[in-house]
Amino acid sequence: MSTHTFDLVGSASAEMVREGFSVDFPDGSDTQVAAIRAAGGAKADADVRDLRGLLWSSIDNDTSRDLDQIEVAERVDGGVRVRVGVADVAASVLKDTPLDRHAAEQTQTVYTAVRNFSMLPTELSTDLTSLNEDEDRMAVVVEFVVDGEGKVQDTSIYRAQVRNKAQLAYSHVGPWLEGKAGPDAKVAASVELQEQLRRQDEAAQALRAQRVKMGALEFNRVEADPVVVDGKVESIGTAFHNRASDLIEELMIATNETMARMLREAKRSSIRRVVRSPERWARIVELVGRHGTVLPAQPDSGALNAFLQAQRASDAVHYPDLSLAIIKLMGPGEYVLAKGDDDAEQPGHFGLAAQDYAHSTAPNRRFVDLVTQRVVKAMLAGEAAPYTDEELEAIATHCNERESAGRKVERAMLKRVAAVALAGSVGKSFHGVITGANDKGTYVRVFDPPVEGKVVRGEQGLDVGDMVDVTLLHTDPQHAFIDFGRA
């Protein structure tokens, strides 16, 4: 797509360092990884169930190698029993070891179009602690029944040995579930796997319907899908969510809710993921009012979702644009301490209409999930908490700060890739939505390709959520600048 010689790979490393991340693992990491490999992974004990005979599968991106979870479902009286197996990273990466301290500082894997910066060495995250196909692994399993109304019943958590029987991709499973394409080779070869996936989908659809009924918000999100090969930008397109990604999202939400609720019921302190009531609700009310709908003066997720559902039905083409505008006005999620001995109600997750919510399903790539896993395992074993409340609060605060920094890296690198890709499009017009308006400037995200830039001409009077037509004025990969003027 572009012959631009800008060093994107080197730029990614520099951006990580600029935002306070390390691009190298600490001394002692190789020794620790070698010891984990020599030990042959975590060992099962009498309290570990052997579930390797179940037809587990994973669904993820085509290029994903750090597989954190696998799923299996079966029909039972009254609904569908779902099991979600989460990689038992805590069994291999012990607390206060060099790799744990590094993960605690980094807090996350940072994904850029040109290079991924792993929280844990890839020898672990894509191999020894990844739920790879045809490999025996240890997992923390969350089990629940989804009844006919989409309610979660009969929940339990336990440790188990598991074996991923089929590593699948959203891009193949989604169109098949939607009836737009046939199954891929793995799914086509197994009628049992086909039935298995349809049971998971049935449970996911019921879960989603129940969440929406309770006031959860449904958005259509589109994301940039850059293809960079050997540092060269081949293309930058659009990635859409499909029924397979929705399936996994619903099962993960149910898993995260179950983890958080069971920790609360056991009076175990933990870290929650919350999205508070939007501070810019008045702006959301104003934006929705332009479409002829009046929202309550106080934040009301049910009323907002009713509007969103009506807009999805009446104007599906522009619904992703509206979704993005509302998402930006909602504000980011954050981590907070939930004390085990405190019965006060937590802020909850406004967008999911969930009171109990924790991040727990990605311990290979998020430190909070690894911390949650340790807290859960201590609960299961009847052991003392692995962290004090003060430590959990400090971890939550640090993870919030690092999450923001990680987003800056990802945005900057996407802008650099887009600046290279759009170098030949100066003077062309684009349609977009204003995503930021403050003393630092006014920012627009155009829809095709879905990339963000700064409005440097005609930005006066624009606010978050405004739809605008803009003209590309200038690109600068080195400084991650994409400048637009109001058309």
Image (cartoon, rainbow, N blue to C red):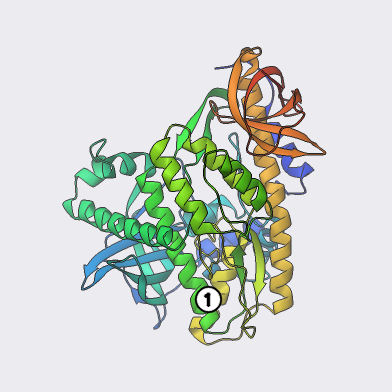
Q: How many marks?
A: 1
Q: Locate residue 64 relative to residue 455 in the image: left or right.
A: left
- Which quarter shows the N terminus? top right
Tell me which residue sits at (65%, 63%) in the image: 335
- The amino acid sitting under disc 1 is Val
**Residue occupying image coordinates x 68% and y 51%:** 280
- Position of residue 317 measured from the top left corner of the image (x, y, whole percent): 44, 31
* Image side of residue 485 versus residue 255, left or right: right
Which quadrant holds residue 154? bottom left
Task: Indicate whether 343 appears above or below 294.
Answer: below
Return the x and y of residue 39 as percentages of the image width and height: 50, 67
What residue is rendered at 50% in x and 84% in y? 381
**Closer-to-camera residue (100/194):** 194
The image shows residue 60, relative to residue 44, as above or below, that is above
Viewer-proximal residue, 194 or 133? 194
**Horizontal and vertical percent for residue 456?**
77, 24
Q: Secondary structure at mark 1?
A: helix
Horizontal and vertical percent position of residue 47: 40, 82
Q: Is residue 165 above or below residue 173?
A: below
Q: Residues within 10 Å of mark 1 (few under 14, many from 20)?
A: many
Q: Residue at x 69, y 35 (%)?
A: 412
Disc 1 marks which residue? 376
